[in-house]
Image: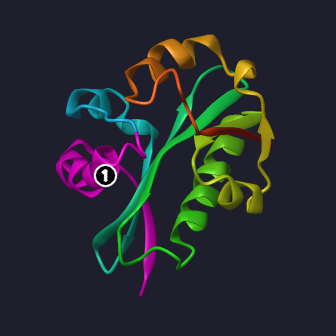
Amino acid sequence: MKIEYKKAKLSDIVMMRELILPEIENGIILDRSEDEIATNIRSYTLVLGDEQLLGFCALHVHTSELAEIRSLVVKDGFRGNKIGESIINEVLKEATSLGLKRVLSLTYKQAFFERLGFVEIPKESLPEHKIWADCIKCKHFPICNEVSLIKDL
């Protein structure tokens, strides 16, 4: 299977929402409206295989030095094939090209991110605007089992 990466377009939003819906329903990924995705469309990178959407994630810039990997999803049936790892590596290249110094992630998949060089940090060290902009919308807030991790670039 030929794998390719591309930046998301507004016309991709419907299929992105379809792919992520089960993870939203399970409380694994935070729900983002079509409008919110559209507003941040330039932060999303898609991974395609044989012209079908296999997964995506966003590189959301918080400051001139810090970004966050969020909304990482791989299509059921394609997990375990290093697609998630490949898309993370793709967005880490983008982060480096932007001149970012660090990339963080809030995740239930700690071991996955640690294999990619991320290290756990206290949630208290997260930017305050992250908590009030995103976390407060989560059905698990304020009792959160996600782990915060960071990677220096």
Pick out the residue farthest to the front: 143
Q: Quadrant of residue 65?
A: top right
Between 35 and 142, the residue placed more toward the observer is 142
Q: Tell me residue 129's x, y (percent).
A: 56, 12
Q: Tell me residue 153's x, y (percent).
A: 80, 43
Instruction: Read off the residue under disc 1.
Output: 20
Between 109 and 133, the residue placed more toward the observer is 109
Q: Quadrant of residue 30?
A: top left
Q: Residue at x 22, y 27 (%)?
A: 35
Q: Tell me residue 39's x, y (percent).
A: 32, 26
Q: Is residue 132 above or below residue 95?
A: above
Residue 78 inside the magenta-drawn segment: no
Q: Secondary structure at mark 1?
A: helix
Between 143 and 122, the residue placed more toward the observer is 143
| Three-letter amino acid code at the position of disc 1 | Ile
Q: In this orientation, does residue 73 appear?
A: yes
In the picture, measured across the screen, residue 84 lies left or right of residue 65, that is left
Between 75 and 110, the residue placed more toward the observer is 110
**Image color mode:** rainbow
Which residues, given as a range, are shown in magenta?
A: 1-29
Q: Is residue 4 above or below residue 57?
A: below
In the picture, measured across the screen, residue 112 lies left or right of residue 25, that is right
